[in-house]
Amino acid sequence: MGCDFSSSPSKRKPIVVAIGRTHRGTVLLDRLNHFQTLPDFLDFLKQPTTDNTPCVAGFDLPFGLPRQFVESMNWPPTWPECMDKFVSHSREELRQFFKAFCDARPAGAKFAHRATDMPAGSSPSMKWVNPPVAWMMHAGVPLLREAAWTLPNMQMGHPNRIALEAYPGLLARELIGHRSYKSDDPHKQTPDRWLARKDILHALDMAQSKLGLRLKLSAAQHDTLLADGSGDALDAVLCMVQAAWAHLQPEGTYGLPNFDPLEGWIVSA
């Protein structure tokens, strides 16, 4: 499963979930689900999987804060207690904490980074604008905890619900470089971005990524992903492919290195 998450989902910007399965090196997309509210998404996360079969899911939201920031705040150095502290604050309180931390640092090094950010090319998890990934963590991690998903090396939960931090930009950049393929602004959903999405889908169909998996779509699914100028559906599918790769790694490893459990790690980085 792959999830393009929104911290404030709506009809215009829902949470999109891609659900599929693997078969002999191929990832097949079964369906796309859309959730317009966080409670609806939580209800979905709590549902047992079909026939109680294991589900490995990639969520496009950070699972942890940079250790450097946590230590500067004197917050608990263990992940569950740190997340309790993090979500106990409002977004405005957190924004003030982040801003004070950044203001005290030199230009060019304002944000603290997690160890996974460099290999993944991801934004700092304490970033509150463009994109506001800190708010995604603030909204999303409590849902995974309440629904008792297992976050490997971070939280033990249901053994058949494995949540991994995914990042669609990591896979997209491998396939098309730094070309832009999406925009939430309809006026910026250009032919060039349409062509970039088409090139991503072609590369996935040809198994051209280091993950070595082929994405198999129906003609209707291909057209749906291509037509979505926001890229949300495609991002969910990219996260699903990353989760499929993790699912195929040696049992219980999910392809993860020996990472800092306070910070978390982006799968396949």
Image (cartoon, rainbow, N blue to C red):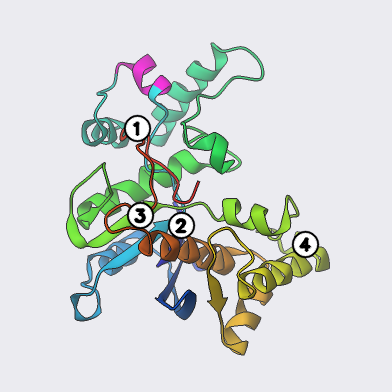
Q: Dot 2 surroundings within 10 Å: few (below 14), some, or many (20 or more)? A: many
Label 3 Cα crowd, 10 Å radius (few <14 / some 14-19 / many 20+): many
Viewer-proximal residue among 261 and 17: 261
Which amino acid does the dot numbered 3 rest on? Answer: Tyr
Q: Is residue 72 magenta?
A: yes
Q: Earlier in the sequence, mark 4 or mark 3?
A: 4
Under circle 4, the secondary element is helix
- Residue designated by label 3: 254
- Ranked by sequence position, the earlier of labels 2 and 3 is 2
Q: Work out how far the residue at label 1 is from the one at label 3, CA to CA, in angstroms.
A: 15 Å
Going from N to C along the chain, the mark reached first, 2 or 1, is 2
The label shown at residue 5 is: 2
Q: Residue 209: where, in percent of width, then height?
A: 61, 61
Residue 187 is marked as 4
Kindly report which numbered mark, 2 or 3, lies closer to the viewer in this rendering.
3
Which range is magenta? 68-74
Q: Amino acid at mark 2?
A: Phe
Q: Pointers 4 and 3 in contact (CB under 8 A)?
A: no
The residue carrying mark 1 is 260
